[in-house]
Image (cartoon, rainbow, N blue to C red):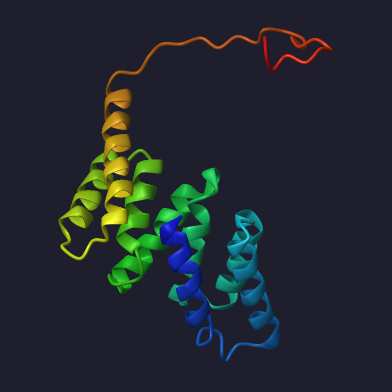
Amino acid sequence: TLFLAILVVSGLSAQKTIGKNWSAEDQKKLKSASVLMENSFYKTAWARYTELLTSHPEELYLKYKLGLCGLYINEKHKEALQYLTDVYAADKKAMDIEFYLAVLYHRTYQFDKSIELANKLLADKKLNPKDKGGIEELIKHSKNGQLLVQKPNDVKIENIGATINTEASEYAP
């Protein structure tokens, strides 16, 4: 959440220069997508940013924003990873790009890459102590993911049938 808050503030200043020479319609879409993202409507923001990327395929800012939206949309993690990888290849200093890549590596089961990138972030002497805990947590989750993938459990999920709740309140004994 701290990273997202920083992103929102920086996104506002970056947005003043991005799209300046675009059509009025595209500028309106960009503003709309930004507002949607700020309000956690990631799927709708994804759609708007995708429309814009069709018109402006080389715009790294749009790829960056799509990567961030994709963090929050399970079925878009692979695409988001590709967008952020493209941004990282062109601009290694894009805000918090390595953190977001580490998270997406984790979410796409690339735990080794996630841990490697997270450890690189931890080695940075300029790292904010507040952010250190989140990165350490990511490493912990990635190590757990490695273990779970190495030793999968054989489970069977069965539907227990029709509605099991009664008409009574069942939230307390």
Q: Residue at x 67, y 72 (%)?
A: 32
Q: Is residue 104 left or right of residue 164?
A: left
Residue 64 seen anywhere in this rendered image of the structure: no
Q: Image height check: is 91 above or below 97?
A: below
* Picture coordinates of residue 24, whole percent (x, y): 69, 87
* Picture coordinates of residue 152, whole percent (x, y): 35, 18
Residue 145 lies in quadrant: top left
* Picture coordinates of residue 21, whole percent (x, y): 57, 92
Residue 6 lies in quadrant: bottom left
Residue 122 seen anywhere in this rendered image of the structure: yes
Query: Which residue is farthest bottom?
Result: 21
Query: Which residue is farthest right?
Result: 167
Q: Is residue 21 left or right of residue 154?
A: right
Picture mark count: 0
* Picture coordinates of residue 92, whole percent (x, y): 27, 70
Q: Residue at x 25, y 46 (%)?
A: 113
Task: Choose between 141 and 104: the one closer to the eye.
Answer: 141
Q: Residue at x 64, y 56 (%)?
A: 41
Q: Image quadrant for the C terminus?
A: top right
Q: Image height check: is 110 above or below 166?
A: below
Q: Residue at x 47, y 54 (%)?
A: 79
